[in-house]
Structure formats: structure tokens, C-alpha cells
Image (cartoon, helix red, strand yellow):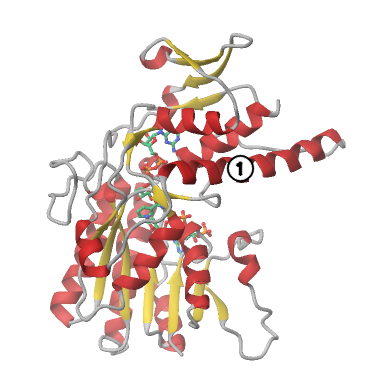
Amino acid sequence: MKKALITGITGQDGAYLAQFLLDKGYEVHGIKRRASLFNTDRIDHLYQDPHQENRKMLLHYGDLTDATNLIRILQQVQPDEVYNLAAQSHVQVSFDSPEYTADTDALGTMRILEGIRLLGLEKRTRFYQASTSELFGKVQEVPQTEKTPFYPRSPYACAKLYAYWITVNYREAYGIYGCNGILFNHESPIRGETFVTRKITRALCRIHLGMQDCLYLGNMNALRDWGHAKDYVEMQWLMLQQDEPDDYVIATGEQHSVREFVEMSAKELGMAIEWQGKGVEERGINPANGKTIVAVDPRYFRPTEVETLLGDPSKAKENLGWEPKISFEELVKEMTQSDLEETKRDELCHRAGFQVYAHNE
Ligand code: NDP
Ligand code: GDR
């Protein structure tokens, strides 16, 4: 039985990957951070009681900023595969916390690779690094491939640039089987609530059911290549099953704007939106009552923005036989319907007199 260690197992991709690997018969180990509240919502359905015999899913306390802890876990688990998904993954937050982002996303990656080396696991342990389309930043070529030059535009992307190259370096220097998956944006019903897609689907559902007045967004012209997280974790595994390690762009090859995402989610809810004004004055109006339901708030503008991203996944299709199965339309529909169910539950609680809090970040 193969053993996998997932950092970031409590995140969106970690949850889908853990499920995927358990279904394949792996023993799955995950690193979770200590928090003052339980933080395992996304993997609670996979949780196995620590008193149970022959567990297939085990969690370890840890943090990417703590090398001693990472080395101890690696030594204990002796994994066949490490999936390094842990990161301070929010681009805007990285402008507020640049040092922490670098410590976790850049140095954290090096700490794991160095741990593999120090423990003499170079020949046993294969390593997957969660690289990102943010590396392309101010794009130098359309669409972006594995050969497109990088131009990072945030502390997050700069940290991930180090992580990308340190993975390549440890592959070349020590023969570690290390791969970078250069993943374009991927979403799902369990996407973090402050990323734009989930923020949109949650807010529109709440507006639809009368629980919120307006959705405030930043740059609605931003263009992204959005896929489904479920499709993308399969590729993370596939990359570690090849004869030779390599780096791959994972994308759909299709691009949409933030505004289009709003329109498609609204359509799913049967809500009409009429756009008025330009730039910071732009508004989405409900034509039935003239109320503003979408507005621009400059607080969500980034000091340096990534305006457009479009990936070319040809290499992954050719070498890994990988293709995304879930379309953009299906993704928006699934996210919207899932948040509608959640909002209906909230509304029921609200009507029954319970307090329901919803952050609007
Ligand atoms: P999430 O933000 O949903 O999850 C991040 C995970 O990392 C969480 O489990 C979080 O723990 C954990 N984490 C954060 N900081 C630390 C730390 N210092 N030590 C240990 N664990 C930590 O991200 P996604 O699942 O969306 O993304 C997975 C990876 O892929 C990330 O590295 C991201 O940068 C990268 N990526 C994501 C893309 C996407 O579109 N989703 C695209 C390209 C790359 P906690 O739950 O406690 O916060
Ligand atoms: P991104 O995702 O920065 O691409 O990083 P996000 O969903 O945060 O932003 C996408 C685009 O939407 C614009 N935008 C807003 N974004 C947020 N979060 N909130 C808003 O209100 C808003 N309004 C407009 C942004 O400016 C941006 O252009 C994600 C993360 O998962 C990274 O970890 C990952 O590496 C990349 O995707 C690929």
C-alpha cells in the first residue's frame, strides 16, 4: 500500500486529493495546523477516529514554517509521495503579509525538500509542488505554456517563483523526483469564501433570498482560465506516476471575465442584471426594482493586478492523457446550486430567530 503525505490537507485541493487517494487505496497522511477552533470541515467526512485500528487517514499537527516538525513527520511517515499544497494562497492577502507568505510558500517548500534529502529519502519519495499560473503575472505570451517566461506580480507569486525553482533545483542537484504543476485557477463548492468565484456565488444567493443587498467587487474585467478542482487533483497524482519527473501547465484553455462569472451565476438563479456606468462607477442593477445589486469597491483593487491568464494544457494532454471533464458552465452551476442550498439553511435559521453571520469580504 502506498503512503502519501499531503500538506494543506484542510484546504480545497487537499480535501479533493485526500478523497481521490483514499479511493485509490493509499494510506493518506495530512498536516493540519493547530487552530483555536476545529479547522477540518472540508475533510470531516474522511476523518477516522484516532482509536480506530488500521486507519487509512491520519492527521499530524504541523506548519510549513517549522522545519523540525516537518522533518519529524517525514521521518515518521516515510511517504512514497508528498503533495505540497499548503500555502498562504490569497494573492491580495500576500500584499498585507508578504514575509509570512514568503516564509510559508517559498521557504516552506525548501524545508520539505531539504527534509527529504536529509533523511535520505531522495530515491523513495516523489514530490509534487503546487505551482501556479500567477507565475506568469504580467503575461509575456498568449496562451501560456511551460516555456512562457515568468513575471510575478505579487508577494504570493514571488514566493511561488522561489518554490518553483527550488523544486527544479533539487530535481537536478539531488535526483529527487519533483514536479511542478502550474495550475490555473480551479474552483468548487468548497472553494475559500474570499476568492472571487465563491464570493460571487455566495453573495448572489444571499441577495436572491433577501439576506444581503449588494455584492462589492474589485476588477470585474480580470480574465481567468477557470477549471474544477476535482479535475485538477487527478492530474496532481498523474504527474507523480510517470517514468520521469517534469513540469506541466494545467488549464482548460478557455477564458472568462469576472463579470461573465457574475452573469452566469445570476442566470442560474433566474436573476436579471443590467449593467450601467463604467470603471469605479459601474453598477449591476436589478431591472425589476432599479436596486444596485453589484457595485465596484476599489478596496478590492490590487497594487499590481494580473489582468489576464489563459493556459495551454497541450503537454499534459499529450504526456499524461489528461483532459478536464467539467465545463465552465457546469462549474458555475454546481457552485451556485451548492451555495443556494447553504443559504436556504441560513435563511431558515434566520427566520426561526437564530443569529446568522456572513462575512462580506
Ligand atoms: P487553500 O487556501 O484552500 O488551502 C491552503 C492550505 O494550506 C490549507 O489547508 C491551509 O491550512 C494550509 N496552510 C496555510 N498556511 C500554512 C502553513 N504555514 N503551514 C501549514 N499549512 C498551511 O488553497 P487551495 O486548496 O485552493 O490550493 C492548494 C495549493 O495550490 C496552494 O498552494 C495554492 O497556492 C496552490 N494553487 C491553487 C490554485 C487554485 O486556483 N486553487 C491555483 C494554483 C495554485 P488552514 O486550513 O489551517 O488555513
Ligand atoms: P487569484 O484568485 O488572485 O487569481 O488567485 P481570486 O479569485 O482571488 O481573484 C481572481 C481575479 O478576480 C479579481 N477580483 C476579485 N478577487 C477577489 N478575491 N475578491 C474580489 O472582490 C474581486 N473582485 C475582482 C481579482 O483582482 C483577480 O484578478 C487564485 C488563488 O487560488 C491562488 O492561490 C492561485 O495561485 C491562483 O488563483 C491561480
Q: Is residue 269 above or below residue 132?
A: above
Question: Residue 135 appears at what percent x and percent y?
Answer: 24, 50
The x and y percentages for residue 351 are: 84, 33
Q: Which residue is mark 1?
A: 337
Kindly tell me whether residue 111 is visible in this rendering: no
Query: Considering only vertical position in the picture, is 322 above or below 68?
Result: above
- In this figure, what is the number of numbered marks? 1
The location of residue 139, given as percent across then percent down, is: 18, 40
Is residue 164 in sight in this rendering?
yes
The quadrant in which the C terminus is found is top right
Instruction: Provide residue 63's location: percent of width, then percent of height.
Output: 46, 67
Disc 1 element = helix
| Ligand 1 location (quadrant) | bottom left
Q: Residue at x 19, y 61 (%)?
A: 315
Is residue 13 left or right of 160 when viewed as pictured?
right
Left or right: 294 as drawn, with respect to 164: right
Q: Amino acid at mark 1?
A: Gln
Q: Which is more toward the observer, 329 or 45?
A: 329
- Residue at the image position 59 percent from the left and 8 percent from the top: 290
Q: Is residue 351 above or below residue 186?
A: above
